[in-house]
């Protein structure tokens, strides 16, 4: 049964699922996603054991509450009107909302009604994406929401820096799917994910994590912008393949274009576009 991700997410790998299915292990390995976002590959493959981790505490709270109380999260979110005034009220209130269930429902509502599925904060860490008058993602049906929430039963969750997550779970019987943010030199409108920006030093830490996974006998698959993909080809046996992605740049239909991402793995799989 096809399960849709619960969330819209800028940079989601939904368009890359077909090639990613080729590299998903069928060994029962522990699935670990340190930058989980919308967890599109997790929902597509529904691994029996998984760890979903992210630095975004509201994201992880949403997943935890959706697993425990899916009906309540769905009902609270769907009772909110899809109007700009309601959206702005919820956006103001979520930061001060202490009840985890209500906060999770607010998070879902904002995600489904914000501009282009973005998660962006200001320097204080407050969500500030504007309301989308059009091109918004529809709210999932109750059946779709509950089916996706049920898939979360196999997952453990953590609010964690990626390096800590990888160090905790690195082992020979683990598969790490890594979809990190692009490293940027300074904050720019509509690019910042969190009040702490993923930058060049984080990229260096990530490279060390890849080597640690390889040394432990684990497997990883990492997707990244083609312009920087050469940085990840650290060892002779690692391989890379290009994936063409149809992107909606800036969220506008007339700005759609093809982009190239590169998939880096430390194991062999059959793909005609792969190279070492």
Image (cartoon, rainbow, N blue to C red):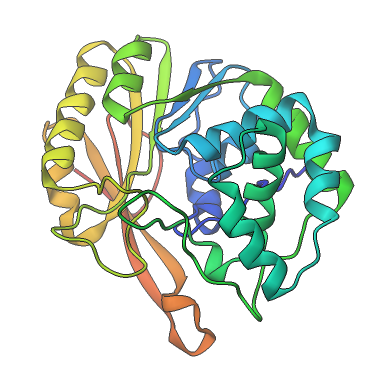
In this image, 120 relative to 263: left or right?
right
Quadrant occupied by the N terminus: top right
Residue drawn at (81%, 65%) of the image? 81
114 is higher (above) or lower (below) than 123: below
93 is higher (above) or lower (below) than 117: above
Expressed as whole percent of the image width and height from the top left, the position of residue 262 reads 30, 53
Expressed as whole percent of the image width and height from the top left, the position of residue 223 reads 34, 47
Quadrant occupied by the C terminus: top left
The quarter holding residue 104 reads top right
Q: Nearer the viewer, residue 117 or 28?
A: 117
Q: Is residue 247 visible?
A: yes
Expressed as whole percent of the image width and height from the top left, the position of residue 50 reads 55, 21
Q: Nearer the viewer, residue 231 or 115?
A: 115
Residue drawn at (87%, 47%) of the image? 142
Residue drawn at (49%, 90%) of the image? 254
Q: Nearer the viewer, residue 228 or 117?
A: 117
Q: Is residue 233 visible?
A: no
Residue drawn at (59%, 66%) of the image? 114
In this image, 262 relative to 207: left or right?
right
* Number of marks in picture: 0
In this image, 51 relative to 61: left or right?
left
Expressed as whole percent of the image width and height from the top left, the position of residue 63 reads 63, 33
The quarter holding residue 49 reads top right
* Outermost bottom residue: 254
130 is higher (above) or lower (below) than 109: below
């Amino acid at each position: 049964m096809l399960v849709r991700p619960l969330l819209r997410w800028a940079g989601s790998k939904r368009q890359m699922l077909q090639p990613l299915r080729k590299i998903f292990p069928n060994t029962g390995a522990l699935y670990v996603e340190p930058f989980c976002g919308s967890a599109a590959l997790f929902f597509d493959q529904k691994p029996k054991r998984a760890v979903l981790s992210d630095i975004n505490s509201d994201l992880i709270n949403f997943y935890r509450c959706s697993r425990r109380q899916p009906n309540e999260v769905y009902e609270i979110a769907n009772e909110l009107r899809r109007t700009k005034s309601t959206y702005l009220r919820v956006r103001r209130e979520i930061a001060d909302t202490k009840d985890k269930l209500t906060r999770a429902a607010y998070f879902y509502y904002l995600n489904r009604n914000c501009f282009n599925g973005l998660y962006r904060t200001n320097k204080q860490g407050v969500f500030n994406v504007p309301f989308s008058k059009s091109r918004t993602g529809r709210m999932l049906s109750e059946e779709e929401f509950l089916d996706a929430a049920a898939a979360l039963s196999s997952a453990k969750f953590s609010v964690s820096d990626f390096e800590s997550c990888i160090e905790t779970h690195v082992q020979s019987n683990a598969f790490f799917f890594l979809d990190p943010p692009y490293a940027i030199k300074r904050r720019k409108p509509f690019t910042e994910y969190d009040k702490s920006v993923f930058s060049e030093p984080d990229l260096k830490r990530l490279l060390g994590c890849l080597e640690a996974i390889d040394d432990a006998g684990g497997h990883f698959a990492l997707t990244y912008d083609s312009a920087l993909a050469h940085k990840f080809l650290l060892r002779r046996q690692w391989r890379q393949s290009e994936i063409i992605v149809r992107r909606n740049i800036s969220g506008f239909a007339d700005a759609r274009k093809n982009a190239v991402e590169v998939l880096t793995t430390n194991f062999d799989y059959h793909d005609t576009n792969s190279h070492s």
